[in-house]
Image (spheres, rainbow, N blue to C red):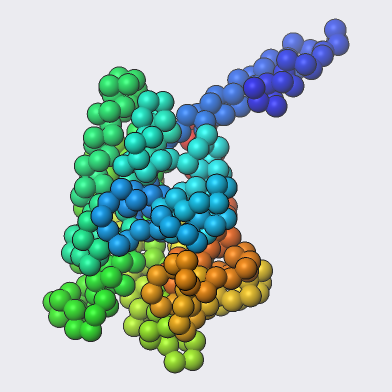
């Protein structure tokens, strides 16, 4: 029972309380009750790469995994879960913020069945990108066409549980998170010198090609019923410890990868605006995660970090080489590091990012932040 409901049951009214006051009170109670029940009922679906993968790759024969220590060292269970984090990742923190009973389970988890299906599902898989040839070195990963096919399968499973009409309503009212694009540069275009994609496209031509392919993915998602879709841009790709270790002489961000992010993110936002105009509704919400990262990368001390260059877990320059393993250097206080491993933010950095997603200004969120969306939807 909500606090408001308890107040409604225990509040006493004197005989002089007006009928109007009572009417207003109980009308407000009913409105808030509906809003709360809608928030509690909202499912959450996640698509994308390692920034949002909660463990699907645990069930695959691939090197793109995070299911061994020290991953998960600060997770409530203190065990590695498949999240590329020391603790919670972005979907976990969004789930907490929107009042979900739990974070959506990986779709490949055998525990995702029965009533837990109604919470939603996480389809993300580390290593994937917009393009199917991204991350080929990881071999067995759930590429985006397969993630969308799993979403279709999910709806069939839920229809058997609650019926087709209720499933359609659940999907239409759900929040959807999509995080793609970084690997199409890091693990494709710039993976090796003179890569196949870099021979095929100059960077200013490659980015519009990615955007056009991304648009097809988002329209496929829309056709599968998604109506509230949060789309994150790439971070500042050239500033992660892995790129500093390989491409930086004095700790400066890698110029070419920064150029890629600077081209990609504005074009992504424009594409989302165009899609919304075409569809006649704010279906797609752009999250400027590049700026969110830049804030604490350029001034880590202002956010309570001692460094935004050195990863907490890793080896080599900036702890940016190779994987995070039990043999890696490991910082004693993860909250002081902006990056957990060579590529991924720490749990604390993820919390800063989600706070901007929830309440950030138009500099960070377009056309509106997630708190505004939730408030609008609760009144619909």
Q: Nearer the viewer, residue 262 or 105?
A: 105
- In this image, 335 relative to 171: left or right? right
Q: In percent of the image, x 69 and y 25: which residue is there?
A: 4
Q: In percent of the image, x 33 and y 76: which residue is there?
A: 260
Quadrant for the N terminus, please.
top right
Q: In percent of the image, x 51 and y 66: which residue is there?
A: 340
Extreme residue toward the top, this view: 15
Q: Nearer the viewer, residue 305 or 226?
A: 305
Q: Is residue 85 above or below residue 243?
A: above
Place of residue 267 in the rendered image (x, y in percent of width and height, measured from the top left): 32, 66
- In this image, 307 relative to 151: left or right? right
Q: In percent of the image, x 42 and y 30: which residue is there?
A: 116
Place of residue 12 in the rendered image (x, y in percent of width and height, measured from the top left): 82, 14
- In this image, 301 relative to 157: left or right? right
Q: Nearer the viewer, residue 105 or 352?
A: 105
Place of residue 76 in the rendered image (x, y in percent of width and height, measured from the top left): 57, 47
Q: Nearer the viewer, residue 34 or 195?
A: 195
Q: Is residue 366 above or below residue 251?
A: above
Visible in this render: residue 260?
A: yes
Visible in this render: residue 262?
A: no
Extreme residue toward the bottom, this view: 249
Q: Count up the numbered dots.
A: 0
């Amino acid at each position: 029972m909500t606090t408001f409901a308890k107040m409604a049951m225990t509040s006493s009214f004197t005989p002089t309380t007006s009928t109007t006051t009572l009417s207003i009170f109980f009308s407000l109670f009913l409105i808030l009750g509906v809003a709360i029940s809608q928030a509690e009922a909202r499912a959450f679906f996640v698509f994308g790469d390692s920034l949002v993968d909660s463990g699907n790759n645990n069930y695959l024969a691939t090197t793109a995994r995070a299911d061994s220590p020290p991953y998960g060292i600060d997770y409530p269970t203190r065990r590695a879960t498949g999240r590329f984090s020391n603790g919670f990742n972005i979907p976990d923190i969004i789930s907490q913020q929107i009042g979900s009973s739990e974070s959506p389970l990986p779709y490949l988890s055998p525990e995702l069945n029965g009533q837990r299906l109604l919470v939603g599902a996480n389809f993300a898989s580390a290593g994937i990108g917009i393009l199917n040839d991204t991350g080929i070195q990881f071999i067995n990963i759930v590429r985006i066409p397969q993630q969308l096919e799993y979403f279709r399968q999910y709806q069939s499973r839920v229809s058997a549980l609650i019926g087709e009409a209720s499933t359609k309503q659940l999907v239409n009212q759900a929040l959807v998170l999509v995080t793609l694009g970084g690997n199409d540069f890091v693990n494709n275009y710039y993976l090796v010198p003179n890569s196949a994609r870099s021979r095929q496209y100059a960077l200013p031509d490659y980015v519009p090609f990615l955007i056009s392919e991304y648009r097809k993915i988002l329209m496929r998602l829309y056709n599968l019923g998604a109506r509230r879709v949060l789309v994150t841009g790439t971070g500042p790709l050239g500033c992660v410890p892995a790129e500093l270790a390989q491409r930086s002489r004095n700790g400066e961000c890698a110029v070419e990868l920064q150029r890629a992010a600077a081209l990609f993110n504005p074009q992504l936002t424009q594409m989302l605006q165009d899609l919304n105009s075409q569809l006649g509704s704010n279906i797609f919400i752009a999250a400027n995660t590049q700026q969110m990262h830049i804030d604490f990368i350029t001034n880590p001390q202002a956010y309570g970090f001692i460094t935004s260059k050195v990863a907490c877990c890793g080896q080599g320059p900036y702890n940016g080489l190779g994987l995070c393993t039990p043999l890696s250097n490991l910082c004693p206080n993860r909250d002081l590091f902006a990056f957990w491993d060579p590529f991924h933010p720490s749990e604390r950095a993820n919390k800063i990012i989600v706070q901007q997603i929830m309440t950030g200004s138009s500099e960070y969120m377009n056309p509106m932040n997630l708190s505004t969306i939730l408030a609008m939807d609760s009144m619909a």
